Amino acid sequence: MPAISASAPGKIILFGEHAVVYGRPAIAVPIPQVRAKTIVSAEPRLAGGAVRIQAPAAGVDAFLAELPPDNPLGKAVSLVLEELGLLRSPACTLRVTSTIPVAAGLGSGAAVTVSILRAFSTFLGHPLPDNRVCELSYEVEKLYHGTPSGIDNTVITYASPVFYVKGQNVEMFRARRPFTILIADTGVSSPTKIAVGDVRRLWQQDAARYEALFDAIAEITLQARQALEKGHIHLLGPLMDRNHELLQALSVSSPELDHLVQTACRAGALGAKLSGGGRGGNCIALAAPEAAAHLVEALKAAGAAGVIVAEVK
Ligand code: PMV
């Protein structure tokens, strides 16, 4: 049996992170330059039912039966077996690799999960439809952080820009004009779970204040969607700046993120903000295409651990 492979892109949230956990809209886009990939190969020499999972970057090389139930890789494999009503699989090895930085707001966990769900279900002869890939990957997302909005698994499953509201049908859309964003890594790894938990505590202490901040973010996200659909890219920059200020007010920025955001703006970006859970990870900057190379240099000189240039279509 030939090996089966599937890959899934990274993602970035353009507008609305954190507020999206509280029912407000957010906009996210796939970042195909970075990807997670799973290759499934039959292992005729292993005993039937043996599923070996190798993910060198996560330090995993184990049989499914040896992994704890809350291991996200094992959980994805088990969910496929459950979904297909199978008690065991033909003996096989899943090799999972990824070029997506971990805990950096680029959707590494969701992309790994989506690639496993697709590759393993195809290997078993029943490729899962997108809606099930999305729903099952949401189950795995809960292992990474307790109350995910579902935006990561959605944008990564559909590999399309999405306007996302928790609990509603996903709306895919296209920007009327392509635009360039730079994704600059602070090099500080920051689990989303902690930032999301801190915001929840703050919200519990002063719901009125935080609801007002979420509403202000929602308004920006709605304006950004209109600007994207009308091709008014120049309007996005100020909206990003304002969204960043609101994320600062939510306490999820950090000195490193603020430094990169300020550097981008001073070096000529049209706008910049943190992206994802915050406290570390990446910020994004909107760039005129001809300014991208100069901005990359400025961000690296300011300490960015890496900069990805992405054209969003
Ligand atoms: O850190 P990321 O990119 O996985 O994004 C988290 C986005 C949040 O809105 C903070 C959480 C969520 O579940 O949507």
Image: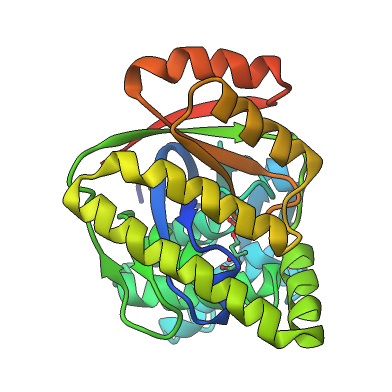
State whether residue 60 is above or below residue 197. Answer: above
Q: Nearer the viewer, residue 23 or 205?
A: 205
Q: In which quarter of the image is residue 203?
A: bottom right
Residue 167 visible to an observer of this rendering:
yes
State whether residue 216 is above or below residue 79. Answer: above
Residue at 77% of width from left, 86% of height from top? Answer: 204
Q: Is residue 233 left or right of residue 203?
A: left
Residue at 48% of width from left, 76% of height from top? Answer: 24
State whether residue 308 is above or below residue 250. Answer: above
Where in the image, quadrant-wise, is ligand 1 located?
bottom right
Please provide percent x and percent y for residue 11. Answer: 47, 50
Please provide percent x and percent y for residue 55. Answer: 66, 47
Please provide percent x and percent y for residue 284. Answer: 53, 39
Q: In this view, does 227 lie to the left or right of 58?
A: left
Quadrant into which the C terminus falls: top left
Q: What colouring does the structure picture have?
A: rainbow
Q: In this view, does 121 lie to the left or right of 184?
A: left
Residue at 46% of width from left, 13% of height from top? Answer: 293
